[in-house]
């Protein structure tokens, strides 16, 4: 857990140091090309450990972290743990709202996908969806 905390904290620092907040195309390229560890791991326990590490890193991080930074660092950290994770962006047209999150595949054979999005209200939402073509969700 301690190693995951430091990886998460360094990931948050790297996001700011590399100015990913100013260049979405560079952020997209980096997250999309992030390697997935050879050990395939789709357990919810691993995902919960990574989420706990991110939450603890956010406590000690000196700046406020928005959803895109949190989701991109979480996606990269999950991939480094062997979880098949992807960055997800959601948008609503009227009134305009946008949010970033991440997803991971639970069982590749049945194509069941788990989404975990942290909404602006602070409530964690976990939804099981079978169709990725849900209106307004873009998988990067």
Image (tube, rainbow, N blue to C red):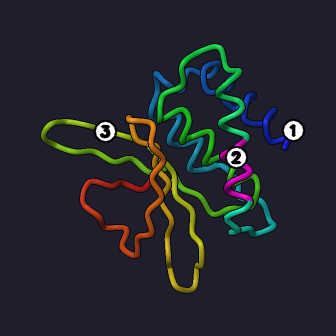
State the CA–CA distance, disc 3 to disc 1.
32 Å
Q: Is residue 36 left or right of residue 131?
A: right
Q: Are marks 2 and 3 in contact (CB under 8 Å)?
A: no
Looking at the image, the residue that sits furthest to the bottom is 109
In the image, what residue occupies the spot 28% across and 45% down? Answer: 91
Looking at the image, the residue that sits furthest to the left is 94
Within 10 Å of the Cα at label 3, are there few (<14), some (14-19), or many (20+) other Cα atoms?
A: some
In the image, what residue occupies the spot 61% across and 50% down? Answer: 33
Residue 64 placed where, x, y %? 54, 19
Q: Which residue is mark 2?
A: 77
Per the rendered image, the range of residues in magenta is: 46-52
Between discs 2 and 3, the one toward the N terminus: 2
Within 10 Å of the Cα at label 2, are there few (<14), some (14-19), or many (20+) other Cα atoms?
A: many
Within 10 Å of the Cα at label 1, are there few (<14), some (14-19), or many (20+) other Cα atoms?
A: few
Where 62 sits versus 15, above or below? above
Q: Is residue 7 left or right of residue 74?
A: right
Looking at the image, the residue that sits furthest to the top is 62
In the image, what residue occupies the spot 52% across and 85% down? Answer: 110
Q: Which residue is mark 3?
A: 98
Residue 127 placed where, x, y %? 43, 63
Q: Are marks 1 and 2 in contact (CB under 8 Å)?
A: no
Residue 73 placed where, x, y %? 62, 39
Q: Is residue 11 magenta?
A: no
Between discs 3 and 1, the one toward the N terminus: 1
State the CA–CA distance, disc 2 to disc 3.
23 Å
Q: Name the secondary structure under disc 2.
A: helix
Q: Which residue is mark 1?
A: 2
Q: Name the secondary structure under disc 3.
A: strand
Q: Is residue 48 magenta?
A: yes
């Amino acid at each position: 857990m301690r190693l995951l905390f430091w990886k998460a904290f360094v990931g948050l620092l790297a996001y700011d140091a590399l100015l990913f907040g100013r260049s979405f195309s560079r952020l997209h390229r980096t997250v999309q090309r992030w390697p997935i560890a050879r050990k395939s791991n789709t357990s919810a326990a691993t995902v919960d450990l990574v989420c706990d590490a991110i939450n603890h890193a956010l406590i000690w991080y000196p700046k406020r972290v928005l959803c895109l930074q949190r989701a991109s660092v979480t996606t990269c950290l999950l991939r480094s743990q062997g979880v098949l994770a992807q960055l997800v962006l959601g948008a609503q047209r009227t009134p305009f709202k946008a949010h970033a999150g991440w997803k991971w595949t639970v069982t590749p054979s049945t194509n069941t996908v788990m989404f975990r999005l942290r909404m602006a209200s602070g409530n964690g939402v976990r939804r099981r969806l079978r169709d990725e073509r849900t209106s307004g969700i873009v998988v990067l």
